[in-house]
Amino acid sequence: MTFLLRFLLFVTAFYILKKLVNYLFGKRAGSSGKHAKPSTGTRKEISGQTVKDPQCGTYVATSIAVPLQVKGKTYHFCSTQCRDEYLKDSDQSKPPDT
């Protein structure tokens, strides 16, 4: 009989401790404690050809890439940061006008 009472006391204490830990540390920002709901309309469908980002070398789908037209040629970048770095690097490599 004492074994059963000790066992129930242990299980109850463990359950309460688990709930307390989840309450204190388990919730993250934007989390409801349940499974995350799928986003509605915020994702872009990935399709098409993949191309290599000339700045960082990452392969990215053309449907989600950041395009840049330079002298009739289209370059695709994984992010606006890579595009801006590419533009900055290409501006510095041009010879100064004299």
Image (cartoon, grey):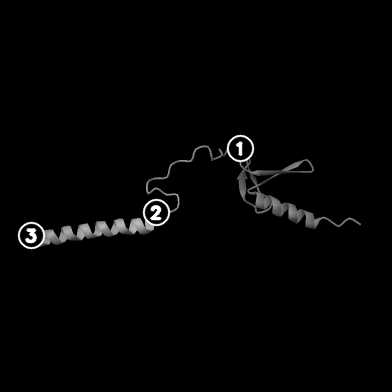
Please tell me which residue lies in front, 46 or 4: 4
Tell me, for residue 1, which label it has, or none: 3
Give the quadrant of the C terminus.
bottom right
Helix, strand or loop at mark 3: loop
Amino acid under label 3?
Met
Q: In this view, does 8 lie to the left or right of 78?
A: left
Q: In this view, does 57 lie to the left or right of 31?
A: right
Dot 2, crowdedness within 10 Å: few (<14), some or many (≥20)?
A: few
* Picture residue at 15% right of the left edge, 62% below the top: 6
Please tell me which residue lies in front, 30 or 65: 30
Select label 3 or label 2 by which is in front: 2
Residue under label 2, please give it.
27
Helix, strand or loop at mark 2: loop
Amino acid under label 1?
Gly
Q: Are marks 1 and 3 in contact (CB under 8 Å)?
A: no
Give the quadrant of the N terminus.
bottom left
Q: In this view, does 39 lie above or below 90?
A: above
**CA separation in Å, label 1 and label 2:** 38 Å
Q: Is residue 17 left or right of residue 35?
A: left
Quick one: label 1 or label 3, which is nearer the N terminus?
A: 3
In the rendered image, residue 29, in percent from the top left (x then y), is placed at: 45, 52
Amino acid under label 2?
Lys
In the rendered image, residue 22, in percent from the top left (x then y), is placed at: 34, 56
Dot 3, crowdedness within 10 Å: few (<14), some or many (≥20)?
A: few
Quick one: label 3 or label 2, which is nearer the N terminus?
A: 3
* Picture residue at 64% right of the left edge, 49% below the top: 79
Residue under label 1, please give it.
48
In the rendered image, residue 39, in percent from the top left (x then y), is placed at: 48, 41
Tell me, for residue 31, which label it has, or none: none
**Residue sticking out furthest to the right:** 98
Quick one: label 1 or label 2, which is nearer the N terminus?
A: 2
